[in-house]
Amino acid sequence: MNRRLTQDALIAPLLTDFDFSTNDPELRKRFEEKYRAKLQEMWDSFLFDLAVERATKTHPLLQTKLHDTPLSSHAKKCLETLDVKTVADIAIYTLPELATIRNMGKTTLKEIEEYVKEVTGA
């Protein structure tokens, strides 16, 4: 039931963008393209969630809350701007993405990188 509501929430806006009162093949084609793109987005999201779930089973420390990590308070503040709540949330981002955070210096970035490597064993 919950997954169905999520699907409806993603697809419903597409329906309001199109007037189906006419039998316009071009309109149908544009709708199908947008619908296909939304379905792909949902599939990618599902696969990503599945990958995170498997990773947290393999590396239980990924479930550690951000405030329970040994990271410096500066690193935690920087990560909080991305709404990071757990170590798994940190691992979602690439180093170049983390480097774009305001006030994220090289030292802080290195600290985060080393911590994630330590937790994941990479």
Image (tube, helix red, strand yellow):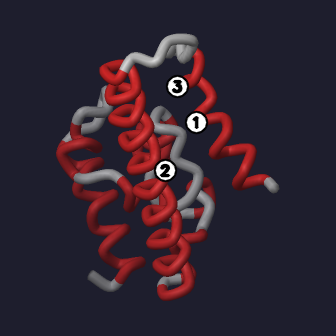
Quarter-wise, where is residue 66 in the image? bottom right
Of 27 and 119, nearer the camera is 27
Residue marked by disc 1: 10
User: Residue at image x 63%, y 29%?
Assistant: 12
Q: Where is residue 92 in the image (x, y as percent from the top left)?
A: 38, 56
Q: Which numbered disc, 3 or 1, marks the residue closer to the eye? A: 3
Whether tag 3 and tag 1 are in contact, CB under 8 A, the answer is: no
Q: How crowded is mark 2: few (under 14 residues within 10 Å), some or many (20 or more)?
A: some
Whether tag 1 and tag 2 are in contact, CB under 8 A, the answer is: yes
Q: Which mark is residue 42?
A: 2
Q: What element carries label 1?
A: helix
Q: Can residue 37 be seen in this view?
A: yes
Residue marked by disc 3: 14
Of 91 and 42, nearer the camera is 42
Q: Position of residue 42 (x, y in %)?
A: 49, 50
Q: Can residue 87 be seen in this view?
A: no
Q: Three-letter amino acid code at disc 1?
A: Leu
Q: Three-letter amino acid code at disc 3?
A: Leu
User: Residue at image x 33%, y 85%?
Assistant: 121
Q: How far apart are marks 3 and 1 (CA)?
A: 8 Å
Asked whether, in this view, residue 97 is left or right of residue 2, the answer is left
